[in-house]
């Protein structure tokens, strides 16, 4: 029996599907929503999987910030694997919500680990912590791997660095099978609309159907190592299946700028972009019509930016046999086509109510 700390997001939904296909019974923590009829797209896939695998998915409304909720959960159920995916996951938001981000991303990890230790379940449970490539921050190396020093520049990254070290400490001090996955940027059609990749693909879809004419972005020069979330969840599962706990970088080894992501997304709908101007005045222009399709807004810049991330998953490839299967171009195409279906009112799956 597995527990997914946050089942309602992109990663939780893909990992839930993967575990169900492997015969697991999956319990998932679902944070309370402000409206009873709201369900994000990722959660709709969890509900669809629950229908396909009857009695194999159990949802627990709650919050990892509540230690009594965690104590009841771990006391009442016997988990063999715990995947900690719960986080305030938006880097930009972390500058405005520094205390909340620290509570969830740093102390939330500690609460989960302390619950396991307090109930003396460290010999029965494998624990996975979702770390992030953002911890590398102002890296001075051309490629980041497990030996690269952490230099976080955002509250999000600082909290994730704490979560990494407290997980490592539990492994060394208490014998808990505790591992960190240092995951580089991973995207999918289930990504939230407040992330730049999904903002781009949803905006391109809206432009294509005539709902808007232009999208507004921040730093076009930020470079990231983007992969598909489904590939990365395969990597997470492989980390947990090892006999000896260890930490792994999961990355594609390819780096592209936000500008390149926009160009690739526009090409899916037949728009070729030409760039004019510099800095805040730079615009992306439709090569055929001359219409401005992309503008830059300095208000969308982060107070401190990680300019470049480029991961090396050599250790994961060598020890786990993991390699990414979905190309960058295929990822962007899938996201744009999914968002086209959404704006046309034909989503593949979208459920807003469930008796689970």
Image (cartoon, rainbow, N blue to C red):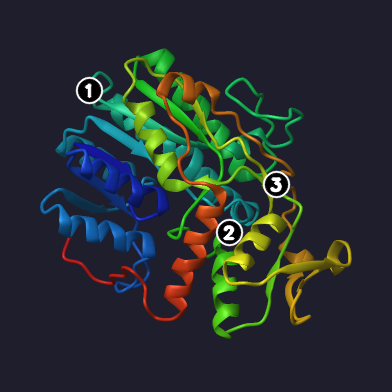
Please tell me whether mark 3 sits on a helix, a strand or a loop. Answer: strand
Q: Determine which of the numbered discs, if any, sits on residue 66 in the image.
A: none
- Asked if residue 237 shows in the view, the reply is yes
- Is label 2 or label 1 in front? 2
Q: Is residue 350 above or below residue 146?
A: below
Q: Which residue is mark 3?
A: 223
Quarter in which the C terminus is drawn: bottom left
Mark 2 nearby-residue class (10 Å; few <14, some 14–19, many ≥20): many
In this view of the protein, which residue sits in the foreground, 60 or 250? Answer: 250
Could you give the CA–CA distance between mark 1 and mark 3, rounded to whole angstroms?
41 Å
Instruction: Choose top left, top right, bottom left or bottom right for residue 179.
Output: top left
**Along the line of sight, which residue is nearer the eye, 94 or 278?**
278
Q: Position of residue 329 (x, y in %)?
A: 56, 53
Identify the mark nearer the N-term, 1 or 3.
1
For disc 1, the marked residue is 124
User: Mark 2 sits on what residue?
Assistant: 197
Residue 59, position as x, y percentages in the image: 22, 53
In the image, taking residue 169 as reference, residue 126 lies left or right, namely left
Residue shown at 30% from the left, 49% from the top: 29
For the residues labelled 3 and 2, say whether their Cβ atoms are less than 8 Å apart.
Answer: no
Label 2, label 1: how far apart the Cα atoms are: 39 Å
Q: Of callouts 2 and 1, which one flags the residue occurring earlier in the amino acid sequence?
A: 1
Q: Is residue 195 visible?
A: no
As helix, strand or loop, the secondary structure at mark 2 comes to helix
Q: Nearer the viewer, residue 145 or 30?
A: 145
**Nearest to N terminus: mark 3 or mark 2:** 2
Q: Nearer the viewer, mark 1 or mark 3?
A: 3
Q: Residues within 10 Å of mark 3 (few under 14, many from 20)?
A: many
Secondary structure beneath label 1 = loop
Q: Quadrant of residue 293?
A: bottom right
């Amino acid at each position: 029996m597995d527990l997914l700390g946050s089942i309602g997001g992109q990663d939780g939904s893909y990992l839930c599907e993967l575990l169900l296909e492997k015969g697991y019974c999956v319990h998932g923590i679902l944070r309370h929503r402000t409206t009873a009829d709201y369900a994000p797209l990722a959660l709709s896939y969890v509900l669809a999987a629950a229908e396909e695998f009857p009695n194999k998915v159990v949802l627990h409304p709650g919050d990892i910030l509540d230690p009594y909720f965690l104590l009841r959960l771990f006391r009442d159920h016997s988990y063999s694997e715990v995947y900690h995916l719960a986080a305030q996951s938006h880097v930009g938001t972390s500058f405005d919500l520094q205390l909340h981000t620290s509570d969830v991303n740093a102390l939330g990890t500690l609460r989960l680990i302390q619950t396991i230790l307090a109930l003396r379940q460290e010999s029965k449970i494998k624990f996975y912590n979702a770390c992030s490539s953002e911890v590398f921050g102002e890296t001075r190396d051309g490629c980041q791997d497990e030996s690269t020093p952490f230099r976080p520049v955002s509250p999000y990254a600082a909290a994730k660095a704490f979560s990494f070290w407290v997980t490592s400490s539990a492994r060394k001090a208490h014998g808990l099978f505790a591992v960190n996955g240092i995951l580089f940027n991973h995207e999918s059609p289930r990504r939230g609309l407040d992330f730049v990749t999904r903002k781009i693909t949803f905006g391109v879809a809206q432009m294509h159907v005539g709902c808007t004419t232009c999208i507004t972005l921040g730093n076009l020069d930020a470079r990231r190592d983007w992969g598909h979330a489904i590939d990365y969840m395969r990597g997470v599962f492989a980390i947990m299946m090892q006999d000896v706990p260890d930490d792994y970088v999961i990355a594609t080894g390819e780096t592209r700028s936000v500008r390149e992501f926009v160009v690739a997304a526009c090409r899916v709908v037949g728009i070729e972009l030409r760039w004019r101007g510099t800095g805040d005045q730079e615009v992306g222009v439709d090569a055929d019509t001359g219409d401005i399709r992309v503008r830059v807004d300095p208000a969308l810049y982060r107070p401190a930016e990680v300019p470049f991330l480029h991961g090396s998953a050599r250790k994961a490839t060598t020890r786990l046999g993991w390699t990414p299967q979905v190309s960058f171009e295929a990822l962007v195409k899938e996201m744009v086509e999914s968002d086209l279906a959404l704006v046309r009112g034909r989503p593949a799956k979208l459920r807003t109510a469930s008796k689970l």
